Image (tube, coloured by chain):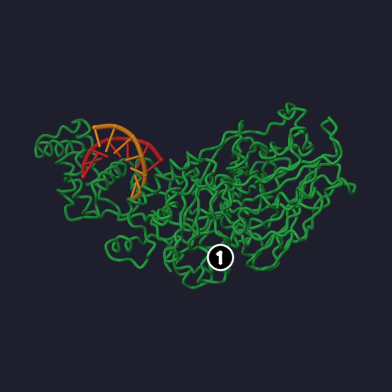
Chain colours: A green, B red, C orange
Amino acid sequence: MVMKKRLDNGFNGFSDWTVPRGPRSLRKVHRKKDFEDGQICAIELLASLAGKLLQDGESTACSNTSDGDHSVIGTNVVKEERLNEEKAFKVECCDGGSSRSYDLDLEKTDEKQNLKKLQYVDNNTVLDCTSVVATSNSSDEACGDVKPVIRKTEFEEYHTKPEEGSPDFLESTDNGMNIGNEEENEAKGFGIGFQSMSHAHNSKDLKKSYGKSPTMANSSFKTKLPLSTDAIRSSFSRYRNYFKLASRDDDEKFRSNKSSTHSNSYRPPSRIAGRRIRKLLNSKYWKAAPKLKDCDVARSESIDDEAQNPFRKRKLHFNTEKYQVDSLYKRRRFFDQSSIVNSDGGMSSESVTNSPEKSVHIDKSGLAAILHGASVSTSSGQEASFLSKDAHVKFSIRSFKVPELFIDVPENATVGSLKKIVLEAVTAFLKDGLHVGVLVHGKKVRDDNRTLLQTGLTCKDNLDTVGFTLEPNLVHNTTPALCPEDPPQMLACDMTELLPSSPVNPVSSSGILDVALPNTTLTNSQNQDENKHELITTSIDKLPDNSLQDCKALVPVPEMTMEALAVVPLNPKSKRSEVVQRRTRRPFSVSEVEALVQAVEELGTGRWRDVKFRAFENADHRTYVDLKDKWKTLVHTARISPQQRRGEPVPQELLDRVLAAHAYWSQHQAKQHGGKHLQAGVVKALEGSSS
DNA sequence: ATTAGGG
DNA sequence: CCCTAAT
């Protein structure tokens, strides 16, 4: 099967053409490529995640104290449709500040090993963007509690029941905050958020590891590894949310196929179209609805059924995020970028997104949960005091996001292997446990001792600003101070208003793709927001005392309006065309360089079209832009030390000519008169310099 | 459609 | 090599 092929420059983060600037920034690459390349639905991720969570089954919820008072407990029941199994896991609560993390135990040693390997291999692996949608049917126990209680939340598949969330929510609320059958409440599914793909960087180590890993075992896989960019990287980073699948560049096919009918029906009609779309997506749409980052995801389907490939026709959103180039070379630790060491727990990945009805949400940052609706009710009067103990706050966690997953797999990898890989990556990250972080207005609340009331989480209005994040329980390495927290992405609906104080980060780019099987392409999403808002603990004080009064006891879950959510291009047709292929890389041969140099000597720089006609008339694959770029790289190459040069070595003589010509034409500001005359000048200059 | 320059 | 902006 051909995954989408993209050609990046391959593993190297650097491309030859990028000379002057040094390594090209990955981030851009990711973004673009991912976008172009294709996407894969990460349904699998969710599924796997869910599975893991389920295994956990009983997480320890902490109840701190007397029956009545548990400060917070969230029980999430997740049901994974695929598995048809339901298991529940609990989310921690933090009352006194102790937040618990999930312990995910991998039952299979293999997996553990694999995971270890993965981790070892790539610190950068991240699952991001995967979100689990939860709707709340809150139930139970809480009622009597004096303290605010977080109700159990269930994960449901949004998709299936787009609007159910609200109804459910309402119900639960209506019923009073009480009740509920915890067990009954079931999450139906997860939405998985997407993924973005990034191309593989060179990750030799990864390759190695992978090769060892069972999953990668298949021969083809191994075989190819060396040659292709097979690597999987996963890392948690707040900045990235996506997992990407990269395939090698084989674009030749693409090019050759251009004219010919391609087997792939989904193949984008034209690059141009793709570009347009991209553009569209990148700017207009997102700007219009920055909030709507979420993507729509199809709900997971039976995994095993290849025929119904989960990847097919899924829509994905992407966000672009920033990525540092050097990151390619430097291994990052898990989560390091996002990780902030908090007293409360680990890294924070802050962003909160909401997703509309669509099942999948993608968040920019790592794991994030969105509260869909929250209501507070006070069973007994709320005493004016902040500390009214009777008041209850209901939280409906709409989704949790999973940290980004970064995966590269060979094109020839099977879907099954991809699934495995994703699963492993997800498992790896879950394995170490998670912490739940609480965000208010996009700012992380670090003081676990603060009461909800103090934090202002008492009524719906306030609750809208709340977000939960699943934080990896690892890493303590990053410098806390440095880590910015991403602003939460608010939900389209209710959240909209919320962020008065917290700026919403515009999405740099995003797109939605459909993934077609034949060319499964990956898309990457990126986003990034680097807002560093610390949470405002102080702001709490400012909360109006009457906040409680304002609250409506039951807040219906906001219904997402489709419009609001309509991040996606209205025109369904366009969806398909988004997959854009990148041209294959065609390194210039020495002879081509020679021809180029010759032409430039004669024509000067700035006349690329002429150069093209003169020297590359027959090379339809060399556009004048290519020539210009090549010249740029040649100049750069000529200036750097031979040791730093890569690729097919260009004779020094040519490089000298390049420099001479470049210098000459720089001075003669493109005032090319007679080519010959100038050429003579160039040659002369060259001779002078060389001798 | 080209050109120029950033990524 | 891609993308954009400016011609």
Name the residue furthest right. Answer: A66
x and y percent of residue A61 in the render? Answer: 80, 52
Q: How many marks?
A: 1
x and y percent of residue A566 in the render? Answer: 50, 47
Q: Is residue A263 above or below residue A661?
A: below
Q: To which residue does mark 1 refer? A: A419
Give the residue at x 26% y 45%.
A625
Give the residue at x 73% y 46%.
A395
x and y percent of residue A679 in the render? Answer: 13, 39
Residue A49 appears in the rendering: yes
Going by the image, does A334 lie left or right of A618? right
Judging depth in this view, the residue of A325 and A641 nearest the camera is A325
- The answer for which chain carries disc 1 is A
x and y percent of residue A220 in the render? Answer: 46, 71
**Would you call the spot at circle 1 few (<14 residues within 10 Å), some (14-19), or many (20 or more)?**
many
Going by the image, does A4 lie left or right of A363? left
Judging depth in this view, the residue of A160 and A131 nearest the camera is A160
Q: Is residue A549 above or below residue A520?
A: above
Instruction: Give SS at disc 1.
Output: helix
Give the residue at x 36% y 62%.
A250
Residue type at numbered disc 1: Lys
Judging depth in this view, the residue of A649 and A323 nearest the camera is A323
Which quarter of the image is occupied by the C terminus of chain A? top left
Q: Is residue A683 above or below residue A112?
A: above
Going by the image, does A446 lie left or right of A367? right
Which quarter of the image is occupied by the N terminus of chain A? bottom left
Residue A201 appears in the rendering: no
